[in-house]
């Protein structure tokens, strides 16, 4: 069909069609809306991305830094980057910080720990460990949303026991994992 269209265009309108470009309308009609395998680099349908000459020198894996722009280690917990400003003397001053606010026991001056291996809550403070405190914000959210008691129970059960702050505290070992965004 494509060759017939090209022939008609050449004979009747004296227009030469570039055979390497293809016909989008014809391709959609033949493929019936399914996706066409294309090269991710040059958008050609004649070869795969792995065979493209333009892909040379392109590395599929990004080299991600392990430190932020101030030279502090980037730490990730539960898939979220921890805010490096939160443990500084001034703290995080951003009104809406996109990073997790986690207290680093070993680096924080405002947390007192004794010489024992565990603090008053029984959390291990030896080594380089962090404690994450999650505030109980669900009652305030329920009030704002004007939810009934049944709705609150359903939401609370689906989220887990959010109201029990000591239960929500947990320790985890500090991991140095690259993150996508820098602070």
Image (cartoon, helix red, strand yellow):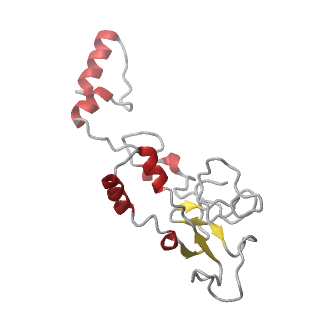
What percent of the width, then of the height, locates residue 87?
70, 64
Residue visible at 65% across and 78% down in the picture: 128
The residue sitting at the top extreme is 12
What percent of the width, then of the height, locates residue 21?
38, 30
What percent of the width, then of the height, locates residue 75?
62, 66
Residue visible at 58% across and 80% down in the picture: 121
Name the foreground residue: 35 vs 69: 69
Residue 182 position by quadrant: bottom right
Q: Is residue 105 left or right of residue 76?
A: right
Q: Is residue 29 above or below residue 132?
A: above
Q: Is residue 142 left or right of residue 90?
A: left
Q: Is residue 28 above or below residue 42?
A: above
What percent of the width, then of the height, locates residue 169?
53, 72
Query: Quarter holding the N terminus?
Result: top left
Q: Is residue 26 above or below residue 133?
A: above
Residue visible at 39% across and 61% down in the picture: 159
Name the foreground residue: 25 vs 104: 104
Name the foreground residue: 18 vs 125: 125
Query: Quarter holding the C terminus?
Result: bottom right
Name the foreground residue: 63 vs 4: 63
Residue visible at 26% across and 16% down in the picture: 8
């Amino acid at each position: 069909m494509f060759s017939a269209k090209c022939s008609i265009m050449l004979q009747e309108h004296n227009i030469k069609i570039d055979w390497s470009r293809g016909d989008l309308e014809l391709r959609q009609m033949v493929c019936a809306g399914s996706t066409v395998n294309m090269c991710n680099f040059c958008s050609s349908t004649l070869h795969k991305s792995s065979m493209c000459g333009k892909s040379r020198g392109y590395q599929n894996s990004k080299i991600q830094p392990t430190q932020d722009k101030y030279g502090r280690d980037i730490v990730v917990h539960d898939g979220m980057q921890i805010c490096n400003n939160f443990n500084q003397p001034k703290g995080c001053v951003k009104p809406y910080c996109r990073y997790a606010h986690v207290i680093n026991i070993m680096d924080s001056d405002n947390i007192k720990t004794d010489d024992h291996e565990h603090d008053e809550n029984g959390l291990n403070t030896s080594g380089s460990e962090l404690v994450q405190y999650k505030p109980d914000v669900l009652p305030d959210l329920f009030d704002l949303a004007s939810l009934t008691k049944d709705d609150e129970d359903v939401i609370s059960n689906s989220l887990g026991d959010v109201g029990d702050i000591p239960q929500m505290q947990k320790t985890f070992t500090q991991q140095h994992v690259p993150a996508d965004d820098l602070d």
